[in-house]
Image (cartoon, grey):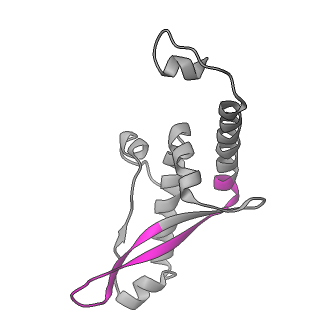
Amino acid sequence: MFAAKEEGRNRWKVFTQAPLQAERERLRITQDLRTALASGQFALHYQPIVNLRTGKVCKAEALIRWDHPVRGPIHPNDFIAVAEESGLIIDIGRWVLTEALDQLGAGRCCWARASRSRSTNHQWSSARLRAGPSPGPA
């Protein structure tokens, strides 16, 4: 019924298991994301950005990775959209920023030690940007 309504008025759809399974998966990922935030299942990896003139690393982009305890590594393409739809992207974005700053301040970023740079790039979701300024680390 919801699929028909999304396409406009005076529509009909034949019921299949696919939408039901997709909704169950979305709900499972949403719950797993909440658990991942609370139990430290996320990790940051850094993609160095090289100055083509000098050939030196000038900054890095922080990339989130999720190592699910049962399903193993989950690609961001499989959870970022669900995080945006559920609003969890706000808390995940806050975690990414806090973790990147903590690692940078503690000197745990090998790219920062090698380049003496303290510059990072962060890609914010549209939901995060609509939420306004971050109140700071949770």
Q: Which of the two residues, 99 or 123, is positioned nearer the viewer here?
A: 123
Q: Give left or right: position of 120 versus 92.
A: left
Depicted 11 relative to depicted 110: above or below: above
Closest to the observer: 15 or 57?
15
Instruction: Decide: is 51 above or below 69.
Output: below
- Residue 134: x and y in percent read 41, 49
In screen coordinates, is 107 left or right of 19?
Answer: left
* Residue at the spot 58% in from the left edge and 64% down from the top edge: 65
Point out the residue furthest to the front here.
14
Q: Answer yes or no: is residue 14 visible.
A: yes
The residues colored magenta run 36-62
Q: 132 left or right of 27? A: left
Image-quadrant location for residue 40? bottom right
> At 65% across and 20% down in the image, what residue appears?
14
Question: Percent x, y for residue 106?
Answer: 50, 79
Is residue 125 placed above or below 16 in the rendered structure?
Answer: below
* 50 magenta-colored: yes
Which residue is pictured at 55% across the width and 57% down the height? 76
Residue 66 at what x, y percent from top left? Answer: 62, 61
Q: Is residue 20 magenta?
A: no
Percent from the top left, x then y, of residue 57? 34, 85
Relative to residue 57, is residue 32 depicted above or below? above
